[in-house]
Image (tube, coloured by chain):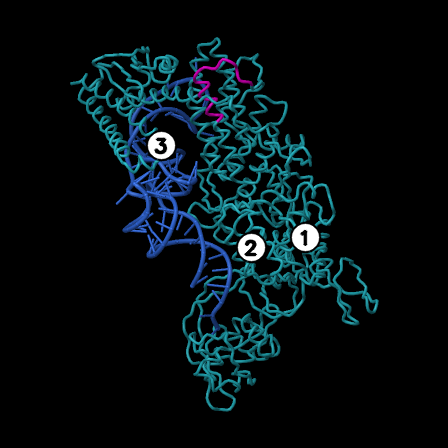
Amino acid sequence: MKKELGKLYEPKEVEDKIYKYWLENDCFKACPDPEKKPYTIVIPPPNITGQLHMGHALDNTLQDILIRYKRMSGYATLWLPGTDHASIATEAKIVEAMRKEGITKDDLGRDGFLERAWAWKEQYGGRIISQLKKMGSSCDWSRERFTMDEGCSKAVKEVFCKYYEKGLIYRGERIINWCPHCLTSISNAEVEYEDQAGHFWHLRYPLTDGSGWLELATTRPETLLGDTAVAVNPKDERYKAFIGKTVTLPLVGREIPVVADPYVDMEFGTGVVKITPAHDPNDFEVGLRHNLPVINVMTDDAKITEDYPKYAGLDRFEARKAIVRDLEEGGFLVKIEEHSHNVGTCYRCGTTIEPRVSLQWFVKMADLAKPAIEAVRSGDIKFVPERFEKNYFNWMEDIRDWCISRQLWWGHRIPAFYCDDCGEMVVTKDESAVCPKCGKQMRQDPDTLDTWFSSALWPFSTLGWPDKTEDLDYFYPTSTLVTGYDIITFWVSRMIVAGMEHMHEKPFDTVLIHGLVRDSQGRKMSKSLGNGIDPLEIIDQYGADALRFMLASGNSPGNDMRYSDEKVKSSRNFANKLWNATRFIMMNLPNDMEITGELPDALALEDKWLVSKLNTLAKEVGDNLDKFELGVAVSKLYDFIWDVYCDWYIELTKPRILAGGETAKTAQQVLVWAILRILKLLHPFMPFITEEIWQALKGETPLMLEKFPVYEDSLSYTSEESDFEKIITAIKAIRNRRAEMNVPPSKKAELFIETLESDVFNKGIMFFERLASASSVEISESVDIPDACTVVTDCARLFIPMSEIIDKDKELARLNKEKASVLKDIEIISKKLGNEGFLAKAPEQLIESEKLKLERANEKLAKIEQSMLAFM
RNA sequence: GAAGGUAUAGCUCAGCUGGUAGAGCACCUGCUUGACGUGCAGGGGGUCAUAGGUUCGAGUCCUAUUAUCUUCACCA
């Protein structure tokens, strides 16, 4: 105990200093230790383009709580940090910056662009990391990784080649989701569907033989340019005669067949569908079945190609207008209906996706998914909460092949090489590939891989795979993966797939899913709404501990939570409360007292009460953390520290310290013992303030490396606990009475206690005086004071003779009210005990406790009646 | 279309394997209480969405309904 604490806790003066202290003492460093059990978390790598937002703050708070708890519980912990190169997001950002300078990607060329991208990464990529440090994250920074660093790149190539050799990766012309803004393909998972109001254009396609026409409806008339057939259902009697005939495509004049395909729903629309294999996934399938030509009518940026001079260069939506107008003029338009339909949009930029046929790389997922499904089904990997397993199965059991090639430069370049001479292709880890047939230098595929391809390997690539490393051996499989439900499909499922395939072992035991942090009105925080809360501003204003505490306390697994300023404030107040509790202790310790944190031998009743309750708390907090119920753990800590420790125990020590001597000394020791234990329990949640207080109080070694308290039999005092509760109950009852009568605390009054448990109540005299405004206390088995306020508890009657303020009628009325309430209790319990079914089927223990309750209630009733007699 | 979440005090949410409803904030009333007004003490406020069912007993389990949110799929 060396320094004086200020009246308010000032996080700004503490946090950076403490974080530095931890770093200097190597507290975050992971060390494989055969004597210990490993506990590993790999961070969901934030994008290098990212700025810390509430989602990160929540995610990292939960991880830090878990890792700190496990570290203090004797595990060899590793929290492995890193960042993701985020191909599309980063490239888009850099391209945008270049655009402002009037430069395009092609101006710089691939190498020039990459140089610029790396420079950008060096400059800004570390920003999010320093922001994570502000949160107090106890990551092992010496092991920080990046999805495009050497090791991760090696892993990516290894996996690509392995998949290729096993025939699990193929290249082919398929219909894929194309983003005309990002100018790249994206995977199914990256498409977001949204309802949009649109139209249904009914068109008339004339039969080539002049015998009439077929009417069909479309939501995308501009794709008519690429129609290569019209389809009807083979069972549809209305159109049987037309199958095999041809129609002439309006505006284009191309002759296209009428085919029969079961894909067509006879009930929907007219029962006739135009088939555009190049621009619709279903049409593409129909095209394959009927061997139809595939005609791409759009450029990369979704403009009509030169093949259609009249519309060439028009954006797809302008082309739509033009084509509709021309159809109308040509008499091909029958009618227009209002129609709302789902439109796929790019999850990055929101642009409407253009389904498009192109040559891409794919991973065959069906076989890979099987062991990954089994790992969860068998319980080897657990989701918390469990219900998200449904989400996972839903996605995995109906999985499509994964389009992994991206037409971007920032990312892992696909390790496939082509020989321009002989057309040979090889997939190899060797960068300088030479054609095995003609010996010529080969050209590498220009595309890069989906960002998620490398993040899928994160749990083992970061530990050194494909090399055999000590870390990989010791820390894999990792323990808990903490992430939001929004990336189960993107990331979690693919890590499980990759782990099972390459490590032949699950990547983690448990997936802890959390929800979103919404704004105070329950809306998603988003840039466009401008309702985002910046965690850094909150930290600046209230401190990282307050933010963390708020995020942890409002949270139950899998559920969204709302951010509100009030909640942060109350967390800040809590930190301040703890701070001031310490201040009180330090102000009241003798200067020469050595802070050992040991419990004295001779404990008073109230000491045992506290010790026992704190012992229970340690057990509960540990249990809750083990079950990932962090929010429950937090609220128990809050209640204990504020109510039990501060409002009761500290208040109880005041008269003792004032009294001096042995009782003061014991109280001081217990105060210290308890606060040290509290600091340890609270540390995972509020690391900065607890460490700061620990240093001020005890110092020498870091709190964060102390042992987390556990339940100990020797600290359990059950009967003392309930004995002291009797005193508390009595004090509360007196306060209540006095408040009702508007007696200020400064007005002291004599107190007479009638009880059969004078042993217990004798130990509370000092507290009745201090906390219940008693000027004197007398305890005996029988008290009879006529003109006194009376309060009744289970085991005592308390008399406060205050004749000057007594109103007999009021007093009688109040006792009547109390009597009614006890009578109601008795009625309920008696009813229960009179119920034969209850007696026959309820557990013995419960029946016993109900009987006891009834007994107590009857005693109380007797006391109340006795007191009422005094007023009649 | 399929699956799932949520519905509890004015607000935000707890409530574990069923046993007479809890917290924080807000509100009201007191308090210059030797750590803290970012505080202390006391108080009011809920037919636990609706209707059934299981049970001796349901906020808790089951079924249906309503409201709301989410994920997946999707018919041109």
> Foreground: A872 or A852?
A852
The image shows residue A721 at horizontal and vertical percentages of: 42, 21
Q: On the image, numbered disc 3 is attached to which residue?
A: A846
> Foreground: A183 or A75?
A75
The image shows residue A843 at horizontal and vertical percentages of: 36, 34
The answer to whether marks 3 and 2 sit on the same chain is: yes
- Marks 1 and 3 sit apart, C-alpha to C-alpha, by 54 Å
Q: Is residue A124 visible?
A: no
Position above or below: A201 against A861: below
Q: Which residues are magenta?
A: A598-615
Describe residue B12's horizontal placement relative to residue A811 as left or right: right
Chain B: give its colour.
blue
Describe residue A119's horizontal placement relative to residue B2 as left or right: right
Chain letter for the residue marked with disc 3 in the picture: A
Q: Residue furthest left?
A: A872
* Residue found 23% across the figure and 12% down from its top: A784
Q: Is residue A605 magenta?
A: yes
Within 10 Å of the Cα at label 3, are there few (<14), some (14-19), or many (20+) other Cα atoms?
few
Circle 3 SS class: helix
Q: Amino acid at mark 1?
A: His
Q: On the image, numbered disc 1 is attached to which residue?
A: A502
Q: Which mark is residue A489?
A: 2
Chain letter for the residue marked with disc 2 in the picture: A
Q: Amino acid at mark 3?
A: Leu
- Which mark lies nearer to you, 1 or 3? 3
User: In the rendered image, what is the letter of the chain coloured cyan?
Assistant: A
The answer to whether marks 1 and 3 sit on the same chain is: yes
